[in-house]
Image (tube, grey):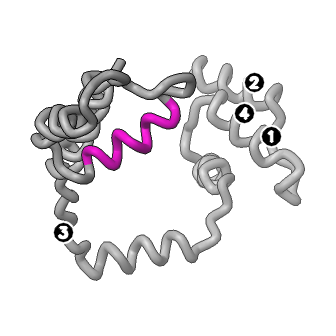
Amino acid sequence: MWGDADPDEVRSTWAIELGVFEADDIKWALNSMRTSFLDYPPTLFQFAALCRDGRKRREQSVRLVAPQIAALPDAVVAKVGEFIAGKRDPRDWARNIVRRSERGEALPAISLAYADEALRGVRRSPGPTVETLREADAEQRTL
């Protein structure tokens, strides 16, 4: 394409076309050329398009602003630290339901059944079975 052209004229044409781009845009275009043009070098207009892509990426990255994060109050930090440090058993909800039931609070049978299922093999004392919970629920409904 440029075989018969004067080399100074070719350099001048490329310089005029690429003169609107920053060095980082051209560097990005050169790097992306390795994956975009494997079989042949790009034309001036194809290379300029890569430079435009580089400029868009640069402009977009400049516009990004890190969010301002306010410092958390010391009380919140302490509470989170306690929560993380404390080794809560994920079955505490089930133990709470069983405790409430043992204190005499009327709870749905299904809640007791789920709690029993969650604590099965964990509690030392045998808890109510699903059948006994259903019977207790039926009794509560007749009252």
Q: Mark 2 points at which residue?
A: 135
Residue at the spot 52% in from the left edge and 32% down from the top edge: 35
For label 4, the SS is helix
Query: Viewer-proximal residue, 63 or 78?
Result: 63
Depth check, front residue: 88 or 4: 4
Circle 3 — which element? Answer: loop
SS type, badge 2: helix
Q: Position of residue 55 (x, y in %)?
A: 21, 40
Q: In this view, does 22 lie to the left or right of 75?
A: left
Q: What stretch is highlighted in magenta?
A: 25-35
Disc 2 to disc 1, how far (Cα)?
11 Å
Examine the structure image and report whether residue 34 is included in the region drawn in magenta: yes
The CA span between labels 3 and 4 is 45 Å
Q: Mark 1 points at which residue?
A: 128
Q: Name the amino acid, label 3.
A: Ala
Judged from the image, the secondary structure of the residue bearing numbered disc 1 is loop
Identify residue for label 3.
70
Q: Earlier in the sequence, mark 1 or mark 3?
A: 3
The residue identified by callout 4 is 113
Disc 2 marks a residue whose amino acid type is Glu
